[in-house]
Each structure stands twice: as structure tokens, then as C-alpha cells.
Image: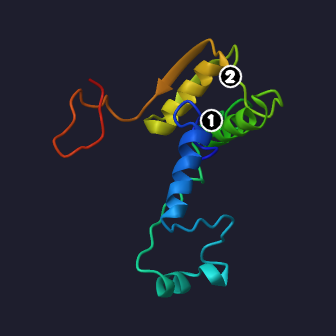
């Protein structure tokens, strides 16, 4: 969450770190660089034996590529590559290090919607892109929330 979610959605120091600290105080143990299933300490058998429940919350770190003509051309990036580099550069240097994929003065096409697509759109606008087109496979979402849906929808 530190690098994959843009700062415009979640302040890293006052929201994310505060939440992590609260969870640690409640007894949550955070283990980074754990190779689950390979490291014997984090084998599925060991995790099952030591815990009552296992929650898989690993995120989608492997992008789904499009096998379309022109995919190999320059200037085409995966969402998480774009978002991670931007947020890391922003946190490390306020973008002064130049270690991010800039959308400044560019026409941008975002293929895909949802939170990740929206994050790419918002980040591109903050960079100062000149134009954005968003291509989405799914239909426009409903104007009102379904009775069983706790998430807010567009009003």
C-alpha cells in the first residue's frame, strides 16, 4: 500500500503508518520479504499449524499483458510499474529524482478501469498530461448502489 496506492488516495505517513501502528499494537505481525511456500518458516503446512486462519491479501503484482499488435512499442507501461515508480519518487524526493514515468505534456490512454485505472488517471492529471482516454471493457456502473453493496457508487 505504501507504493502501489497514490498519495492522493491515502496519506502514507498519517493514515497508512498510523493504521499499521494500530494493527501492530493489536498484535498483528507484519513480515516483509517472506517467500511464502518456499521459505520453510512460511510453508503452508507451517502457517496452518501455527495459525487459526490464513488470509491471502497479496494483491495483483503480476500484470495481465495484452497480446495485441504494437504492444512492444515504447511508452506502453503496466499500471503498477507506473504507480509504484511515481509514488516512490514522490516519497523519496518529491519527484526531483526523475525516477518515475512522466505523463507531463503527453496524451495518455488508460486501458482498464476500477481503482487501479482511476489511480493511473489521477496520477497522469497531476503530472500535467494534455489529454486522457480511458478504455473499459465493462459497461457503465449503475447510478445507484445495489441493496447488498456497501461501497459508495456515483450519485
Q: Quadrant of residue 124?
A: top right
Q: Name the N-terminal-most of marks 2 and 1.
A: 1
Q: Residue furthest toward the left? A: 147
Q: Residue at the location (79% across, 32% down)? A: 93
Q: Is residue 30 left or right of residue 150?
A: right
- Badge 1 crowding class, 10 Å Cα cut-off, few under 14, some 14 to 19, many 20 or more, is few
Q: Foreground residue, 141 or 30?
A: 30
With respect to residue 87, does 32 lie above or below? below
With respect to residue 141, does 22 lie above or below? below
Q: Quadrant of residue 78?
A: top right
Q: Residue at the location (58% across, 13% down)? A: 131
Residue corresponding to mark 1: 69
Q: Is residue 64 visible?
A: no
Q: Is residue 143 left or right of residue 41?
A: left
Q: Is residue 64 left or right of residue 48?
A: right
Give the spatial CA distance, label 2 vs label 1: 23 Å
Q: Foreground residue, 136 or 38?
A: 38
Residue corresponding to mark 2: 103
What quarter of the picture does the C terminus occupy?
A: top left
Residue 66 in the image, given as x and y percentages of width and height = 57, 42
Residue 39 in the image, given as x and y percentages of width and height = 67, 79
Q: Provide the secondary structure element on which disc 1 rests.
A: loop
Q: Quadrant of residue 83?
A: top right
Q: How is the image coloured?
A: rainbow
Q: Provide the secondary structure element on which disc 2 rests.
A: loop
Residue 112 in the image, given as x and y percentages of width and height = 48, 35
Q: Residue at the location (62% across, 20% down)? A: 126
Amino acid at each position: 500500500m505504501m507504493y502501489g496506492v497514490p498519495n492522493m488516495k491515502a496519506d502514507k505517513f498519517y493514515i497508512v503508518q498510523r493504521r499499521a501502528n494500530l494493527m501492530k499494537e493489536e498484535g498483528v505481525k507484519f513480515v516483509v520479504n517472506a517467500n511464502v511456500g518456499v521459505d520453510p518458516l512460511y510453508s503452508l503446512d507451517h502457517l496452518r499449524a501455527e495459525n487459526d486462519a490464513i488470509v491471502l491479501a497479496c494483491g495483483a503484482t503480476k500484470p495481465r499483458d495484452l497480446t495485441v499488435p504494437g504492444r512492444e512499442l515504447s511508452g506502453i507501461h503496466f499500471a503498477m510499474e507506473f504507480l509504484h515508480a511515481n509514488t516512490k519518487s514522490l516519497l523519496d524526493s518529491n519527484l526531483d529524482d526523475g525516477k518515475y514515468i512522466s505523463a507531463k505534456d503527453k496524451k495518455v490512454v488508460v486501458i482498464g478501469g476500477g481503482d487501479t485505472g482511476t489511480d493511473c488517471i489521477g496520477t497522469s492529471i497531476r503530472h500535467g498530461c494534455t489529454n486522457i482516454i480511458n478504455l473499459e471493457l465493462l459497461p457503465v456502473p449503475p447510478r445507484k448502489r445495489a441493496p447488498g453493496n456497501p461501497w459508495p457508487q456515483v450519485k
